[in-house]
Image (cartoon, helix red, strand yellow):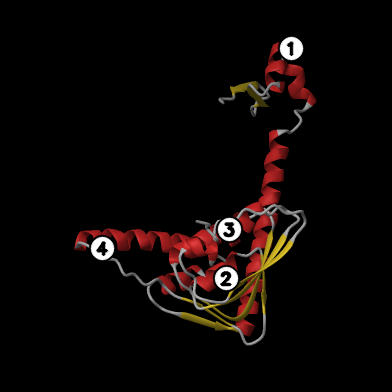
């Protein structure tokens, strides 16, 4: 029997894809084709994710969000209508986002339908709370404030319309840009400190063996406040 959902694609690159999420987010098996494309894309490929969605299964949403954010290609989310619940998570998981006029975004906490013993229900709810909290703090970072995320997790639904969505996206982009610049500057500073050229005064105090150990990264060398040579072994 042929499994129509299980299809392997061989394609040239670069490729430009369009995929519509314009219904409820259903069980994971319904998205094998999208998963295959996301897995096979390279850095020159693009995918437009057209979103008009009221949400759906949390575990499917988590799976797709993970694949979008880890995709080697570029996923561009387009909100045209509504991005509610899981739809908002998928939209904000994209590498870039476009919002069309009169659209709405909504975020809320999850609904559970677990059966079983009371102790099982408690553990299930606690696990779901940890998962949802981590997911929201990750995906909604920079779009909602930490206080707003906490309100959403506590059960306060958030509805945002077109103008405010665009404003929040701009602020998020600027925040991420500034954090990237800061991280790059910090890395550059650490590298410069790591590979700082010793002064002539310091080099002249080193023996040949000590200089070799320094070049090999086995020791760190410095001068104390009295000009005395200090050798510090570097542990691997």
Query: Which comes sooner in the sequence, label 4 or label 1?
Result: 4
Figure quadrant of residue 99: bottom right
User: Residue sitting at 44 percent across and 75 percent down?
Assistant: 108
Marks 1/3: CA–CA distance: 58 Å
Label 1: which secondary element: helix
Which numbered marker is on residue 208? 1
Residue on which disc 2 sits: 143
**Residue 204 image position (x, y, % from top left):** 77, 18
Residue on which disc 3 sits: 35
Residue on which disc 4 sits: 121
Q: Say few, some or many: other residues with alpha carbon within 10 Å of mark 2 (under 14 / 14 to 19 / 20 or more).
A: many
Q: Is residue 81 above or below residue 48?
A: below
Q: Which mark's residue is nearer the viewer, 1 or 3?
A: 3
Q: Which mark's residue is nearer the viewer, 4 or 1?
A: 4
Q: Is residue 144 visible?
A: no
**Residue 49 image position (x, y, % from top left):** 64, 69
Q: Which mark's residue is nearer the viewer, 2 or 4?
A: 4
Query: Which comes sooner in the sequence, label 2 or label 4?
Result: 4
Q: Nearer the viewer, residue 133 or 123?
A: 123
Q: Nearer the viewer, residue 162 or 60?
A: 60
**Residue 194 image position (x, y, % from top left):** 69, 34
Q: Which mark's residue is nearer the viewer, 3 or 4?
A: 3
Query: Which comes sooner in the sequence, label 2 or label 1?
Result: 2
Label 4: which secondary element: helix
Task: Kindly give the residue lying farthest to the right in the view shown.
Answer: 200
Figure quadrant of residue 59: bottom left
């Amino acid at each position: 029997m042929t499994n129509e959902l299980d299809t392997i694609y061989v394609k040239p690159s670069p490729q430009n894809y369009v995929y519509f999420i314009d219904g409820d987010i259903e069980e994971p098996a319904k998205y094998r084709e999208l998963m295959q494309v996301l897995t096979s894309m390279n850095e020159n490929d693009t995918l437009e994710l057209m979103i008009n969605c009221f949400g759906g299964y949390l575990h499917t949403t988590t799976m797709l969000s993970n694949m979008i954010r880890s995709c080697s290609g570029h996923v561009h989310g387009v909100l045209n209508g509504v991005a509610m619940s899981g739809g908002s998570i998928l939209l904000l998981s994209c590498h870039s986002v476009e919002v069309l006029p009169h659209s709405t975004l909504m975020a809320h906490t999850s609904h559970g339908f677990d059966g079983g013993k009371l102790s099982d229900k408690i553990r299930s709810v606690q696990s779901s709370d940890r998962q949802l909290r981590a997911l929201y703090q990750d995906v909604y970072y920079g779009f909602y404030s930490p206080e707003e995320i906490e309100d959403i997790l506590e059960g306060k639904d958030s509805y945002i319309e077109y103008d405010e969505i665009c404003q929040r996206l701009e602020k998020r982009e600027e925040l991420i840009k500034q954090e990237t610049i800061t991280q790059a500057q910090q890395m550059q500073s650490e590298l410069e400190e790591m590979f700082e050229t010793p002064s002539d005064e310091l080099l002249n105090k080193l023996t040949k063996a000590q200089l070799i150990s320094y070049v090999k990264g086995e020791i760190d060398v410095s001068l104390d406040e009295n000009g005395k040579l200090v050798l510090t072994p570097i542990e691997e």
